[in-house]
Image (cartoon, grey):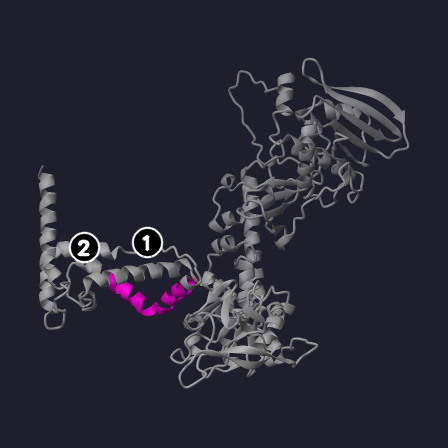
Amino acid sequence: MKFDDSSNAVIERSGLTSEKQFGILFNAKMSAILSNGLYSDKIQSIIRELSCNAVDSHIESGQADRAVEVHLPTTWEPWFHVRDFGVGLDDEQVCEIYTIYGASTKTHTNDLTGAFGLGSKSPFSYVDAFDVTARKNGVERQYSMYKSEDGMPSVAMLGEFATTEPNGVTVKMPVKQEDIRRFSEKAALVFSWFSIKPLITGVSDLKIPENTAAYQGDGWKIRKRAAHVYSSDPVNRPVALMGRVAYPLDASGIADLTVAQKTLLEIPTVLLFDIGELEVAASREGLGYDKRTQDNIRNKLDIVLAELAKEFEKKIAAAATEWEARRLFGEIFGNDGGFRHEFAKAFGNKGLMWQGKLIKDAHITIKTSDIWDSSIVYSPLVWRTYSHYKTLRKMNAHEHLTLRCTSDIMFVFDDLDRGAQSRINYLHQSNSQHKEIFVFGPSDLKTVADIATMLGNPEYKMASELPKRPSVARGARTTMLEYRTTVSDTGVKAWAQASVDLDDGGLYVAMDRYTVMDGVQHIDNLYDIREKAIEVGIIDKSQQIYSPRAEMRKKVAEHGDWINFFDLLREEITARLTPAVLQAVADLNEYNAVVQVARDTSVWQHKLNIQNTQGVFAQFVSAMQTFEDTYKKSSVYRSLINLALMFGKKIALPAPSVDAQGLHKMMLASYPMLELVFDRYSSRNINSANAHRYSDYINMCDEYSTMKMETAVESLIAA
């Protein structure tokens, strides 16, 4: 590697009486500094320096594509060696290279990695002696490189022999037993950057990491993040690759980085440089961040950013549909690509244009009330499969449906009177159950094409196009008991026989002599359980519950299209009792507790002209109005809790979001006349005729409290 001497200054001298150049006293202390003290990671440095020297020798001899040989230590062969088949060394060259620190034969070219004249001595950082075998022009010479009694590096020729072996050099050193594994680990890291991997001996199963590119361009690439390791791990850090050496990139050493440039140094970015473009530390473990090096790194980062932006735009523009465009956006800026936060920061989360539409996220949101009239249909007619479920589940009540655009989602539109669920369940199972399937029921407001457009025009299938589940006895029917809620004019709830096609699937329960069973537990209130399941949207009114005969139970339980009703309830209850739902229930309980003692709800329901919006009364009214809004919308929550309690699920509710009972007590203390309103025998409800009196009284109390506070503060200041 050539050294950059562009910064060498011309010094004008005048008026000097004497001049003398600095020198260096080479002794055992300086030897230790240049070997043992030079490298922070001695093992990795030895492997890197000796292997790079070997590759340089192959390049010099015109064999750049030939692999060098590396022996990694094992328990029975505890040594490390590197052998090349390059130009070789004669006795004069060995003595010159190994006895003079700073001597190098590579300062004339940027085709070779070495230049400092230090790497060949790197074994001295680990051992006091190592062997060198040099072959050149039919002569093999063996040397011992060792530290003498006074600590000075020395060389001794052990023998000289005629040989038919090719030219080359072998450097061999002993390895401590406790370091055997570390040599393999460090070698894997070093050789991951070699385009021509070494021929490894000793260790037979060395796994060299693949630097697989997620993105790449002219002189750069961004590696895929290595899984199951920290982002600070070397395999996930940015590097400057110069020759065969990867130098860690330290953002703190580079001045004037933009936010985007700095962000690229937070991910596994690889910047490729020709040998000599960057200043390198003598240890070759890092860079020397001189002005030229910083400029070259910043320029390369700008190239990466410009090429990435073009690649992103080109990728999105090629999408045929909005769904596909958003899916690709998710690959780039979402979790799929692994660089979501970094790319969003680097590119300002500005989004990308697709056919005149700005794409800023990987989701599609549709308003279900535009598809189904919510006054007629309580919950949207959307079913969904999950990978670990056997069958479809009806989605809960909601106004908006937000889907992440991925290739793992399939859409089906139900255009059959019956049998669609069986076909879709079969599709789910035959798809290795790794895809989610969303099924849309018929709509009176939108056509299939309309709904597909709302979804961004993803690929979809009609249920009638799906294959039926194959069956050797297709069409064979069996008799089961079907639960009927009204089998007579008197409304008696009972069971009746029904002919059922097993392949149609459905819900079932087990019975023992007309007693519904959940395992060993008797269920006496199936009607109430079913009604609440319908209310919270777990099942639809049209879904029937069956009970197979004893001899059919095993076959039904193992059938992919039948599911135990109580198992379904337990799964759905667990999934739906989210922290938000539990918080809403806790707030409802708090609301009910205040209603019990307050009695007159007009106190917070009637709008009063209260001037102090931060007063106790205003806080109490705000809390109760918020709770009341939740109360009106929360019948589903209460039914869900009741359903959970029916199945013995313990519910641990959080504290209410506001201590309304405490506010109620504070209000009575702050506005004592209001206690008349809460008198259980009182009928003085607040109305439009008397509201002003209440307002005046509350405002008067608030003003008096404020005045007392101000007087107290003034007294404290005066004191």
Q: Which of the 4 image quarters holds residue 701?
A: bottom left
Q: Please say whether residue 627 is one of the residues in the magenta stretch.
A: yes
Is disc 1 surrounded by few (<14), some (14 to 19) or many (20+) residues within 10 Å? few
Q: Main secondary structure of the magenta part?
A: helix
In the image, residue 566 lies at what x, y percent?
A: 50, 66
Q: Looking at the picture, which amino acid does disc 1 mark? A: Ala
In the image, residue 106 lies at what x, y percent?
A: 72, 34
68 or 22, which is in the foreground? 68
Q: Which of the 4 image quarters holds residue 563?
A: bottom right
Looking at the rendered structure, the number of numbered marks drawn on it comes to 2
- Measured Cα–Cα span from mark 2 to mark 1: 18 Å
Q: Which of the 4 image quarters holds residue 4?
A: top right
In the image, residue 515 lies at what x, y percent?
A: 49, 70
> Element under label 1?
loop
398 or 22, which is in the foreground? 398
The furthest residue to the top: 149
Q: Is residue 288 left or right of residue 351?
A: right
Q: Please say whether residue 630 is one of the residues in the magenta stretch.
A: yes
Residue labelled with disc 2: 665
Whether residues under marks 2 and 1 lie with C-beta atoms below 8 angstroms apart, the answer is: no
Q: Is residue 285 left or right of residue 487?
A: right
Q: Which residues are magenta?
A: 622-644
> Element under label 2?
helix
In the image, residue 708 lies at what x, y percent?
A: 9, 49
Residue labelled with disc 1: 655
Residue beneath the point at 36% across and 66% down: 638
* Figure check: 466 above or below 52: below
